[in-house]
């Protein structure tokens, strides 16, 4: 079973929920798909036991063969091939999608591919939670291929929890695409409601079963509960504001680790999701 | 020497467009005669991505040696640099003939570098 934990924006407690659920459901694999700012391990506090480079194929032009015909630049739908006549031909790394098309269209056979390192895949383990974390290099604009690669690294047969990137952009689509169930973490505020509605558009379009977790459930209004009734989406858990959760969180300790009560609650949550799926 | 000015519309008496990669059009001027050689539509106005790269590439292949615009992204800056083209700054929406005069009089400041792209800081947990 793959369960993705997502939220409309950052700061809702998404990672706290993902890590707590992983600790409760262990043994389990946890994927940190927020490759621009991975932080699940701040709460898991595991030591790294392995890391591999993540590279993509990248076109390199041989200036001795190139005659500046511009066929590659005309072909590239992303405007990634730059031809400066008589001077230089090169691909723009932040834009190139590694499609390999320019190599095929070059009449002079001047383009070849070399791996270009875009980031790292890190492996951690603690409390029977195996964390696979993607970390994209600063400045790389395309998170999608790295997120896809994380899903290819999944061990067979293991249950998987995915800590999705915030927002409802492409990377969220990428990290919920193969999920059996999506948990949406939100807060009972107008912003929380707005972001929840945006996130539901993504999950609706992917036709995924969803459930809601309301964090800091005692601070706001009841609009989220009304929405959940209207759309018959279950509210799986409510986490009221607690100074204990907040202070442990600031030390990097998630509720399921320091509190028996919350560990039980997250175990119940996990069984609950298994029944729905 | 030829220089290009980013402009809002494809006509000789247009005004400066403060953007570069997605500028509406370009006016190309010969600095020796002060004459406008050409006005060209920018085909990259609605490009999905890489507008800065493509626009810089287009101007480089037109043989211009300087561009005047309001701002320059890192991509466009790098291509202009690789092609040996200098960029100069002009603010606001000044008229083309004024911009060209100021440039010829050496009144415009060169754009020395572009700001890099920042990293997302959401504090998301
Ligand atoms: S298609 Fe090949 S020969 Fe033509 S400009 Fe590109 S790299 Fe050079
Ligand atoms: S590999 Fe594809 S995206 Fe990259 S420069 Fe070549 S054609 Fe463009």
Image: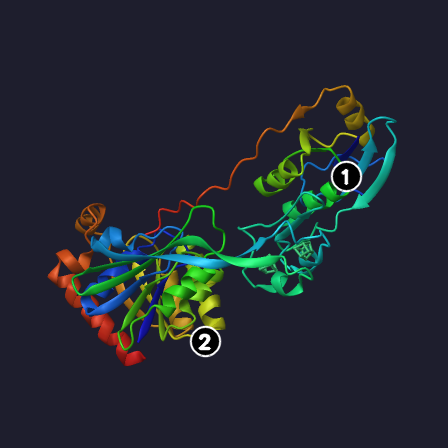
Tag of residue A199: none
Q: Where does the N terminus of chain A fall, quadrant-wise?
A: bottom left
**Where is residue B39 shown, x and y percent of the image?**
83, 41
Chain for disc number 2: A
Whether residue B75 is visible, yes or no, is yes
**Where is residue A64 shown, x and y percent of the image?**
64, 50
Whether residue A217 is visible, yes or no, is no
Q: Are marks 1 and 2 on the same chain?
A: no
- Nearer to the camera, B116 or A85: A85
Find disc 2 in the rendering and name its residue: A207
Q: Quadrant of residue A183?
A: bottom left
Tag of residue B63: 1
Q: Quadrant of residue B70?
A: top right
Marks 1 and 2, Cα distance to the nearest angstrom? 53 Å
Which residue does the image show at 57% across and 63% down from the upper left?
A100
- Nearer to the camera, B107 or B79: B79
Which residue does the image show at 67% across and 58% down from the upper left?
A72
Residue B99 vertical position relative to residue A56 in the rendered view, above or below: above
- Nearer to the camera, A68 or A252: A68
Q: Is residue A167 left or right of residue A253?
A: right
Which residue does the image show at 72% across and 41% down from the upper left?
B60
């Amino acid at each position: 079973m793959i369960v993705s934990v997502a939220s409309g924006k950052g700061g809702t407690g998404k990672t706290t929920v993902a890590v707590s659920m992983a600790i409760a459901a262990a043994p389990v694999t946890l994927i940190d798909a927020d490759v621009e700012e991975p932080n699940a391990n701040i709460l898991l506090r595991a030591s790294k036991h392995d890391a591999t480079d993540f590279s993509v194929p990248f076109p390199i032009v041989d200036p001795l063969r190139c005659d500046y015909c511009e066929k590659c630049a005309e072909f590239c739908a992303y405007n990634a091939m730059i031809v400066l006549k008589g001077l230089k031909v090169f691909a723009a790394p932040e834009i190139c999608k590694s499609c390999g098309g320019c190599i095929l269209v070059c009449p002079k056979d001047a383009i070849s591919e070399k791996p270009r390192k875009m980031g790292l895949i890190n492996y951690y383990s603690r409390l029977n939670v195996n964390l696979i974390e993607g970390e994209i290099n600063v400045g790389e604009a395309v998170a999608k291929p790295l997120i896809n690669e994380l899903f290819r690294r999944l061990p067979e047969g293991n249950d998987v929890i995915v800590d999705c990137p915030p927002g409802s952009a492409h990377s969220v689509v990428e990290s919920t695409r193969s999920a059996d169930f999506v948990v949406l973490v939100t807060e009972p505020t107008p912003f929380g409601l707005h972001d929840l509605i945006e996130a539901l558009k993504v999950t609706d379009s992917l036709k995924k079963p969803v459930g809601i977790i309301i964090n800091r459930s005692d601070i706001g209004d009841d609009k989220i509960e009304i929405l959940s009734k209207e759309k018959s989406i279950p509210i799986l858990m409510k986490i009221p504001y607690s100074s204990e959760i907040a202070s442990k969180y600031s030390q990097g300790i998630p509720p399921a680790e320091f509190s028996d009560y919350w560990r039980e609650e997250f175990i119940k949550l996990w069984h609950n999701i298994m029944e729905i799926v | 020497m030829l220089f290009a000015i980013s402009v809002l519309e494809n006509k000789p008496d247009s005004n400066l467009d403060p953007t570069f990669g997605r500028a509406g059009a370009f006016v190309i001027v010969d600095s020796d005669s002060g004459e406008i050689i050409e006005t060209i539509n920018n085909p990259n106005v609605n490009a999905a991505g890489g507008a800065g790269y493509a626009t810089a590439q287009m101007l480089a292949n037109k043989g211009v040696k300087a561009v005047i615009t309001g701002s320059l992204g890192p991509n466009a800056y790098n291509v202009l640099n690789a092609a040996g083209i200098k960029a100069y700054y002009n603010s606001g929406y000044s008229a083309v003939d004024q911009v060209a005069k100021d440039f010829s009089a050496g009144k415009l400041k060169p754009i020395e570098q572009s700001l890099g792209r920042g990293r997302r800081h959401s504090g998301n947990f």
